[in-house]
Image (cartoon, helix red, strand yellow):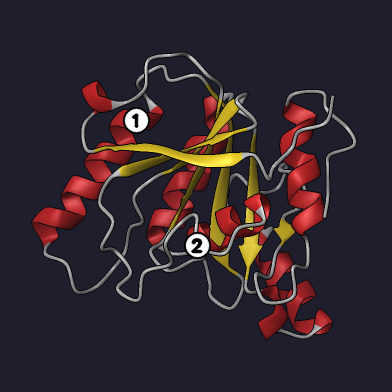
Amino acid sequence: MAINFRKTVFKGVAAKLDQCPNDQLPEIVMSGRSNVGKSSLINALAGQSKLARVSNTPGKTRMVIYFEVDERFYLTDLPGYGYAKVSKEVKAGFSELVDQYLSAGRPIVMVMHLMDIRHKPSAHDMQMISWLSSSGTPWRIVLTKSDKLSRQQINKQVQELRKVPGMKEASQPLLFSALNRQGLTEVRETIAEVFDDIPVEND
């Protein structure tokens, strides 16, 4: 049976590991820099415009956020990193929570790491790619805001990304645009493959 992404609901937040759900539902984890577009991707996947609030102040959300999809798994939104206007202590808190989360034995079945296709990978991006490439957890890179570049520019950026340690053997990055919905079907199908569910219910 296909996954009905429209049956996505907000389930709660956690500021500490002991506040995380313990029902052992599988998790598709989304990570990435603040303002990279995680909320926009979640909204697009769910076909809802306001499910995940898209804040005008990136970095404001400092907790793990859970969305339950079709009563079958969680979309888990990790705190964003790299927002310049928060203190070093707060940044360290983001990093600590993310590090703890990824190493806590959670039922993570895939990590989708989002990166803005217009920019080079940050130090945090490279650290995450290094961890993912050695973790044994299935993962994909999602390059957001793909509508901002031409096809030639996209190809150049993807080629540069391939040079990052850990990326050489990785699957082809997924392209996504919240503006024109480019790549939405591919992202849904990538998630569905984890659960051996193809096709998915697209709009």
In-image side of 46 versus 100 (left or right): right
Residue 50 is tagged as 2
Viewport quadrant of the C terminus: bottom right
The residue that mark 1 highlights is: 101
Q: Position of residue 131 (x, y in %)?
A: 47, 37
Label 1 crowding class (10 Å Cα cut-off): few <14, some 14-19, many 20+?
some
Question: What residue is shown at x 14% (from left), y 55% (from top)?
Answer: 90
165 is higher (above) or lower (below) than 163: above
Residue at x-position 73% and y-position 27%: 194
Residue 19, image quadrant:
top left
> Closest to the observer: 188 or 105?
188
Image-based side of 119 in relation to 183, left or right: left
Q: Earlier in the sequence, mark 2 or mark 1?
A: 2
Left or right: 128, with 140 as reference point: left
Q: Residue at x 74, y 37 (%)?
A: 4
- The answer to whether residue 164 shows anywhere in this view is no
The amino acid type found where label 2 is placed reads Lys
